[in-house]
Image (cartoon, coloured by chain):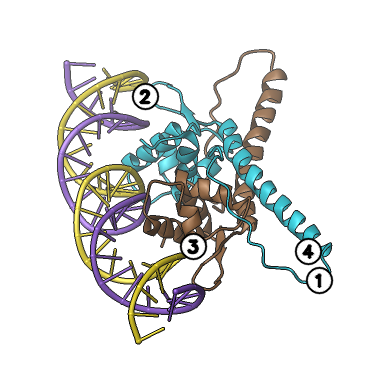
Chain colours: A brown, B cyan, C yellow, D purple
Amino acid sequence: MAADPLSRVFSALADPIRRDMVARLAVADGTVNELAEPYDVTVQAVSKHLRVLEDAGLVSRSREAQRRPVHLEAEVFDLMTKWIERYRRQAEERYRRLDDLLRSMPEDAASTTTPLPRTGAQT
Amino acid sequence: MAADPLSRVFSALADPIRRDMVARLAVADGTVNELAEPYDVTVQAVSKHLRVLEDAGLVSRSREAQRRPVHLEAEVFDLMTKWIERYRRQAEERYRRLDDLLRSMPEDAASTTTPLPRTGAQT
DNA sequence: TTTATGCTCAACCAAACGGTTGAATACAGG
DNA sequence: CCTGTATTCAACCGTTTGGTTGAGCATAAA
């Protein structure tokens, strides 16, 4: 299996079939066969996809006779949104400051290159 | 290269090094060498990572002598956040309705299984 | 008990991925 | 012109991924 939770979630959603399954599970829980029906792949392939979604914490599976109903776990989304929002905001803040700087600087002096920070960011 | 834009963005961010680079680029633009420095891989590998980020629309590269400064493009994040928010909200709405239903139903009748919708969802 | 249904496990395969090394290109400076 | 620096291209390699088929297991129905 992959490494960190964030990588697992992102890569789980990097596949169109898996995203479509998530989309459908947002409407209602479903069994493996139900979920497999629309796609042009075998049930086994869908079973594998579900395993990936489960490992990422995006779905959970219960037991109901011989069926294994799949349920969407929406909380994990927060992991992603938090990460995304953080750096989006940070980037926007930077543009704002740059903007201010440029506005407060009537005469040309665009030669200072801002150095990159070391890697400290918690991914 | 992959297929649809959403898949490209998600899979671009599924790698820890690439996420870390995005995190650092949110603070300041940087050259390939600067970006490569913290990681224990060759510059060529980082160059490849940057290509993935660029193909996903997450960064753009300009030209400045022999250097190729990399710049974060924050707008693409919206693609993801919109997708995520949509289905998170949909899921939460479903739970709310289920909750209401169960509350308005004093006597036990938990036997109706809601069928899954076909695949129509725009992934 | 036998049969059908729902699902997973195992082995396999081609393609994509993340990394490497080595050569090529582009530009700046002596 | 030659040298050094920044970056990319090309070929290669081991591992992962998304798919297949075929067998196996558990439960429901006959």
Indicate which disc residue B102 carries.
4
In space, the residues marked 1 and 4 are separated at their CA atoms by 9 Å
| Residue that numbered label 1 is attached to | B107
Quadrant holding the N terminus of chain A: bottom left
Q: Is residue A15 visible?
A: no
SS class, disc 1: loop
| Residue that numbered label 2 is attached to | B66
Which chain is indicated by disc 3?
A: A
Q: Are marks 3 and 2 in contact (CB under 8 Å)?
A: no
Assess disc 3: are there few (<14), some (14-19) or many (≥20) residues with their C-alpha within 10 Å of its C-alpha.
some
When asked about the image quadrant of residue B42, the answer is: top left
- Residue A102 lies, in percent from the top left, at 67, 20
In space, the residues marked 3 and 2 are separated at their CA atoms by 44 Å
In space, the residues marked 1 and 3 are separated at their CA atoms by 37 Å
Tag nearer the camera, 3 or 2: 3
Task: Please state which amino acid type lies under the numbered disc 1.
Answer: Glu
Q: Is residue B65 visible?
A: yes
Task: Please state which amino acid type lies under the numbered disc 2.
Answer: Gln
Asked if labels 4 and 2 share a chain, the reply is yes
Front residue of A121 and B100: B100
Task: Please state which amino acid type lies under the numbered disc 3.
Answer: Asp
| Residue that numbered label 3 is attached to | A55
- Residue A29 lies, in percent from the top left, at 60, 58
Residue at the location (69% across, 29% down)?
A96
In space, the residues marked 1 and 2 are separated at their CA atoms by 75 Å
Q: Are marks 1 and 2 in contact (CB under 8 Å)?
A: no
Tag nearer the camera, 1 or 3: 1
Tag nearer the camera, 4 or 2: 4
Residue at the location (34% across, 41% down)?
B43
Which chain is indicated by disc 4?
A: B
Front residue of B22 and A56: A56
